[in-house]
Each structure stands twice: as structure tokens, then as C-alpha cells.
Image (cartoon, helix red, strand yellow):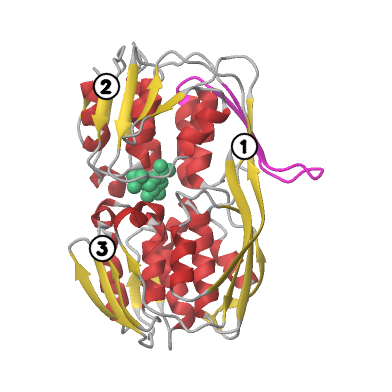
Amino acid sequence: MLSASGPLVGTVRPPSDKSLTHRAYILAAMAEPGVPSTILRPLAGEDCDATLAALVECGHDIERFEAWENGEEPMTLVQPGPWQSPTIPLDCGNSGTTMRLLCGVLASRPGLSATLIGDPSLSRRPMGRVVVPLRSMGAEISGETAPLQIEGQRLQGVDYESPVASAQVKSSLLLAGLNASGTTWIKEPAQSRDHTERMLDALGVTLMKDDDGRIGVMGGQTWGPMLFRVPGDVSSAAFLMVAAALVPGSQVRLIDVGVNPTRTGILDVLEAAGAAVSLDIPREETGEPVADVTVRGDCPLSAFEVGGPLVPRLIDEIPVLAVLATQCQGRTCFRDAKELRVKESDRIAVMAHGLASMGASVEELEDGLAISGPTPLKGAAIDATGDHRVAMAFAVASLIAEGVTTITGTESVRTSYPDFLADLMSLGGSTG
Ligand code: S3P
């Protein structure tokens, strides 16, 4: 049981960014063999570890330094080797990013043969969204849900218009396009996170953008080793931001947070709801904007609207923003968020059910949620269905709930935020 007997106060460096760690590992393995790449402060969570283990199976050498030694930051060295067919199925665990990005990387390596598998949640998630466009480039991939069997081919560039705003789809195609003949173009209905594009740009790869919002990459480009320091993950920091906004008198400073504008919808919404949010020491780390973010919990909160192009900018934060909405004056609507139904769980259904059992006034919509507030929350038995973001969202809800909340399925936090509970307790949350 978690509770906040008083305000949450203190400073936390959130875990490093999951999206950036995956991409740094993959682009390091795709670099020209020679000098290894150095990834400083990668996320040590199960999702990114699945990517790393898959790369080892594909012939790359990895050396990890996990402890802070002599003031040195934890780091992973990635030495690219010749790509080889793994002798065992590549287990992507719970990680959609691992499976979708590796699809593009592996399908574009002629002669390579690989099987991608995942846990029960990942095995239910749609892979057709990458498999179908990759097939149009000449890829041989069987299955549209895991397990996926890939027989690498020489691919040709395509011009693809994706029906979903998904950075995983965009990245998978761009990574395949880098090893394809001709140019690969992708257009998405709204801008998704642009980490792949920024990282490629920082590595000296030429990307093309046109007025129509299409992004293109010419095949055959190569790059050398990278030195990349991974900033903190705004999506993980979001749980502590919302906790601070909800618990009166709180003041939480989150340092070294990635504030790429394609990810900062959470900050815009907190401000729209009336929370006191301030950013300082803005800086840049290898093409990614970074800042320290402080949130105070002494403001009345009002309902907010989430829909349209804002959705991909906060897609992973909707579970915890739904908790925030229960304490806002008025009716908050989350629309255009059908994507949530195919995340690690059906996050619309699971959040609607769990919040209702805690006493919230919540309506499940086909593409989102409508929540009226404020309503006092009461303790309940919650099944996080093995979804890390749902588990952490309900942990935040339990801080302000009257009575005992028990959450099952919390081991899942190991995928993205292994120290979540410790960080929350360091700010004054307590278990009992
Ligand atoms: C991610 C993109 C998002 C996000 C996921 C990580 C990425 O998925 O939900 O947690 O690293 O590219 P989609 O872009 O497919 O929505």
C-alpha cells in the first residue's frame, strides 16, 4: 500500500529515456565496424535489455559497465560485427519498440534469417503496421503478430503513407530504407517522436523532408561510432510530475529530463490544467533538448482537453493524466487515442475499469476517456494487467486515495522504470 502522508518534496533524476536507449543501441550496431560506440547512462530496464540481447545474438559485441565507478557514468560499449543469423529466436519480451524496429533492420539484411518472439502481451499487438509496408519494399516476413519469421532480402525504397502516427512504424521503415536501394519515404498523419531522425542527423546521415511532411532517406549511407549520453525519460518523469501536482504542498524537481517537443505534451497539459510547472537550465545533448523540470502541488486544477496532434506527443502519459483528470474541476476528454487499445494492455479499458473502482466518474469512449471531477478516490484492488504504465498510474492514484489500494502486476515496472517505488519513497511517499 502506498500513501502520501505529507507533501512530496525533493529532487529525482528519472531513469534514462527508453526510446533513445533502443535507438542508440540499434544505430550503434548498424554503424561501420571499427571503433565501438559509447552509450552513456543507457536505460537499464528490461525493454532495452531485450534489444541489446537481440543485437548480441545478431553478431555484435557488447560490454556493459553498470556501476558508477570513479565518478564514471554507467555505459554500454557496442562494437558492430558482421550481421549474422541468430541461432535462437530473438525474445523481444514486452517491448514493441524492439520488435518493430528490429523488423526493419533485419528484413533489410540479405541472407539473414531470424524469428522474433515476445511475451503474451507483445504477441497480441499488431505487427502488420510494420510488416505490410516492409513487404511492399520486398521484405519476406511471415506473420502479422509475433512470432515473426524474417528472411532478409535486398529491399527497394517505397513511398509509404502510414495510417497511424507511430514513431515505431516510421523508424522501422527508415532503418530498413538505410539498407535498401533508392529512397524510402514515409508520411504520417501527425508528427510522432522524432528521435530516430535527430540521431541519424547527429551521425551525419542525410535525411530529406518535404513540404508535405514526408521524411525520406537514401539507402547505402554509412556512419561511424557514436558517443551518446541518454537524458532522463519524460514519460517516466511524468508519474512524479502528476504525483507532485496532485499532492498539496509538493515541490518535486526532476533533473536531466529530455524535453524534445515531440514528447512534451505532458508539460502543456499540466500547464493547461493549472499546475505550476517550470523549466530551467535548458541545454542540448547530442541533438536532444534537455532541461530540469519543477512541479509544485499548490494550485487548483481544472479539466483539460486531449485530442488531435497532441495525442502522439503524450501517448504514453495518458494513463497517469487520466488519474490527474479525476482531481480536476470539470469534464476532461481524451479523444483520438484509439492507439491506447493496442499498447501493452488496452489502456482505455483498464484505466476506465480501475479508476471507476476507485470511485472516479469515468466514461469509456471508443477512442479515449471522459472523466468528470473532482471526485475523492478510495482504495481498491487493481489489476495492472502486467502493464508498466498502468501500474505506475495507479500507484500515483493510491497516493491520494482514502484507504488501501493493492495493485497486482507491478513487476512490469522493470521494463521502463525499475526504481519507481524507491524514487517515489525518496520524495516522501510511504508504503505500509
Ligand atoms: C515509442 C513510440 C510510441 C510509444 C512507445 C515507444 C518509440 O509508440 O508508445 O512507448 O520508442 O518509438 P508508437 O509510436 O508506435 O505509438
Residue 148 drawn above or below residue 166: above
How dense is the environment of label 3, judged by Cα within 10 Å: few (below 14), some, or many (20 and up)?
some
Q: Position of residue 222 (x, y in %)?
A: 51, 16
Which residue in the protein does label 2 denote? 158
Mark 2 in CB contact with mark 3 (< 8 angstroms)? no
Residue 223 numbered mark, or none = none
Residue closest to the far front: 211
Which residue was labeled with disc 1? Answer: 286
Tag 3 residue: 335
Which residue is drawn at the image coordinates 21% and 70% (left, top)?
364
Please give the range of residues in magenta: 57-79
Q: Is residue 49 left or right of residue 91?
A: right
Q: Amino acid at mark 1?
A: Thr
Picture layout, residue 427 above or below residue 18: below
Q: Quadrant of residue 426?
A: bottom right
User: Can the viewer see residue 113?
Assistant: no
Find out whether residue 62 is within the magenta segment: yes
Cβ of mark 2 under 8 Å from ligand 1: the answer is: no
Task: Tell me the kind of residue under disc 2.
Answer: Val
Instruction: Using the image as rendered, state which of residue 427 and residue 55 is in the foreground.
Output: 427
Query: x, y percentage for residue 153?
Result: 30, 13
Measuring from the top left, give residue 47's x and y in whole percent.
45, 44
120 or 362, which is in the foreground? Answer: 362
